[in-house]
Image: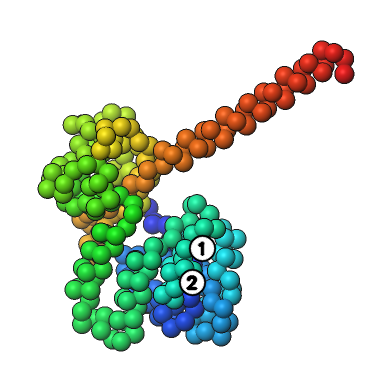
Amino acid sequence: MEETPQKTMRIAVIGGGRRCRTLIEMLDARRFPSLRAQIVAVADPDDQAVGIQLARHKNIFTTTDYRDFSRLSDLDLVIELTGKEELLEDFQKHNPAKVRVLEATISRLFSDVIRLREEHLFRERQLELIEAIVDSVFSSIRDRVLIMRPDYKIVDANEALLQWVGMSKEEIIGKFCYQITHRTLEPCRDKGCYCPLSESLETGGVGHAIHEHYDRDNEIRYCEVTTVPLKSRNGAVELILEIVRDITDELEQKLEQKTRALKRNLARLVHEDKMIALGK
């Protein structure tokens, strides 16, 4: 089966200095072969910073104010490379909900990779560094994350996921994903539920779905589930990364807003009917 092309991630960078320049060069040179991404915007108060200059040369959108990123359409991720966490916090207060922001801890780790590349240490220590970075990112990321084999069995989970389901890592490793998140012995697809993991295995691309999962109190929570295939050099899917985000509160808030809007519209219609009945 022909693979569906993976969507290119559109990234904006806060900080247009040397690290930004190096990141652009690394992406151009495909230093991250499994990451389909492009820099679409760079912000720095110094419009002559080396990263800004390179971005401008490559016709990438540049600005002196990172808040301008909120005007960009289809932006997927924002990375902060200045080391100033307050900039990231400020952007998070104003950014669109759909735009993911690389958290401060992960941004620092990302910056360290770039710094090591600049110091020509990346090649010599590549495997060791990547493993350490992946471990750090995996542990610190706020979203709940599972790593599974193509047979749906769990091989690892981050702390956020373990706390959410109320289990230890030893209790879930080797179990099927649906046993942990759906509390069932049947695959979700067999129960008429769309499976994003199956989508990733079939297409080789990212899978998405909204599922009902159970938390540590055995209560149903509505979750946005994203699956990302991790492939070997020959293109075979070896592992699946599943990212779970609880959107229950968000959905309830939207439902409440729509209910209020419907009530207002109903009240207006009733008032208009009364006026018509009175001949006004």
Mark 2 / mark 1, whichever is N-terminal: 2
Q: Is residue 100 left or right of residue 65?
A: left
Q: Examine the rendered structure and indicate whether residue 101 appears above or below residue 83.
A: above
Q: Residue furthest top?
A: 277
Residue shown at 54% from the left, 73% from the top: 43
Q: Secondary structure at mark 1?
A: helix
Q: Residue furthest right?
A: 280
Count of all numbered marks drawn on residues in the image: 2
Task: Check if mark 2's residue and mark 1's residue have beta carbons within 8 Å.
Answer: yes
Viewer-proximal residue among 59 and 51 = 51
Q: Secondary structure at mark 2?
A: strand
Residue 45: image x %, image y %? 57, 78
Viewer-proximal residue among 99 and 85 = 85
The quarter of the picture where the C terminus appears is: top right
Residue shown at 57% from the left, 60% from the top: 70
- Residue annotated with mark 2: 14
- Residue annotated with mark 1: 91
Q: Examine the rendered structure and indicate whether residue 7 appears above or below residue 150.
A: below
Residue shown at 49% from the left, 59% from the top: 92
Amino acid type indicated by mark 1:
Phe
Q: Is residue 277 left or right of residue 33?
A: right
Q: Examine the rendered structure and indicate whether residue 43 appears above or below residue 252.
A: below
Viewer-proximal residue among 71 and 158 = 158
Question: Neighbour class for label 1 at 10 Å: few (<14), some, many (≥20)?
Answer: some
Q: CA distance from mark 2 to mark 1?
A: 10 Å
Amino acid type indicated by mark 2:
Ile
Residue 71 is drawn in which quadrant?
bottom right
Q: Nearer the viewer, mark 2 or mark 1?
A: 1
Residue 12: image x %, image y %? 49, 67
Residue 89: image x %, image y %? 47, 63
State the colouring used for the structure image.
Answer: rainbow
**Is residue 227 in sight in this rendering?**
no
